[in-house]
Image (cartoon, rainbow, N blue to C red):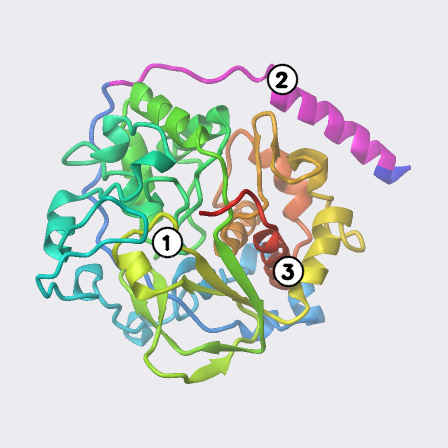
Amino acid sequence: MKLRAWRLALALFLARTIFAIPAQQAPQQNQQQASEQSSQQGQPQDPRQDSRRGSQEGAQQSKTNRVPPPWAYGLKTPLGSPSSEEPTPTPTDKLAVDDGKAISLPGSPVSLTLTQMRNQGTVDWYPGDHPKMPEIVEQGRKPGVLACPACHYTNGKGDPANATIEALPYDYFVQTMKDFRGGLRKSADPRKYNTPNMIQYAKEMTDDEIQASAKYYGSIPLISRIKVIESKTVPKTRLVAAGLYFPLPGNETEPLGNRIIEMPETPEAFIYKNPRSNAVVYVPVGSIKKGERLVMEGGDGETIPCNYCHGSDLLGLGRIPGIAGRLPGYMVRQLFDMQNGARTGTWTEMMTPVVEKLTIDDMIDIGAYLASRKVGVAH
């Protein structure tokens, strides 16, 4: 009876959310700039000892006292650690040196040197893969709004340091930006610098600019570009300033433990912002199957099945976004942020009963399974 009552309550809430909430269009075209762009300080982590797989103590831990899993936020040490213990990340512009040779990608009509790429800003390697970009997307607006492809790429695929934003419902995209603007969406680990950046951009952008961005990225079909590997080990890595793992030269590995480690398919894929490139994701052995039970069945009562709201194919329902085929680190961050009060806003109330009982291990399993779902056809 309890489950039936919950399903009825959820159905009523879902119907109100999808069909009755009007798109918020309050004009704020003349938003003034907030703070200066946050300095780039991203870094990743090591697994939490009290979050070991199967730990009863971790499952009982008070959510308000939990420490964010550093690896999910592009960090090496837990929140509260001395800053001196964080490794110094490699600045993005120091990842490669221009040798003067023109660079091109397979099937692209574009050919540029590394210096030309950096001077140009957004490089549209494959203009036929997407509609014409609005000016605010392609160029941003100085001094306070960075061009979207600098982080999310021309097609919205993103990389492990941020989010996949292609195929997001228009209303969800717009409301998300308004939540950033209104202080309703933050990061549970304040050291993750690109969340404050998004807050700044949302405050700087006009409603028209937000809506143009939402229409553009929402019109691009989702193609999952993620290679998921279940493993007990992971290549040794270093951090770059974007809060991203790069594999070290050679073949040295380290235990994966209770983490998800994501990295670009190649360093060049990140440096050149190749929109057709894949992310390589290492997840714990058995996590995909465990995640499937949690996502599709609710596990053993730990959560509510995701397909109730996100659609039977997990590709979204009305204003509710799809979650299949998206980057798992981002998924873990959002589950943790909602569970621990860093992310609030219009749709977070709906997620409260979904996330309240989840352990970090559950979040890992959910992220692994969702990332393993193949969506669309890659080039």
Q: Is residue 12 magenta?
A: yes
Instruction: Point out the residue furthest to the right here.
Output: 1
Q: Is residue 203 left or right of residue 47?
A: left
**Lower position in the chain sequence, tag 3 or tag 2:** 2
Q: Residues within 10 Å of mark 2 (few under 14, many from 20)?
A: few
SS at circle 2: helix
Q: Is residue 77 magenta?
A: no
Q: Tell me where residue 297 appears, x and y as whole percent.
A: 78, 48
Q: Residues within 10 Å of mark 3 (few under 14, many from 20)?
A: many
The numbered mark at residue 19 is 2
The residue range painted magenta reads 4-29
User: Cβ–Cβ below 8 Å for labels 1 and 3?
Assistant: no
- Residue 263 or 187: which is nearer the viewer? 263
- Alpha-carbon distance for marks 3 and 2? 31 Å
Q: Amino acid at mark 1?
A: Pro
The residue identified by callout 1 is 190
The numbered mark at residue 130 is none
Q: Tell me where residue 133 appears, x and y as whole percent.
A: 29, 29
Instruction: Point out the residue furthest to the left here.
Output: 100
The residue identified by callout 3 is 365
Q: Quadrant of the N terminus?
A: top right
SS at circle 1: loop
Q: Amino acid at mark 3?
A: Asp
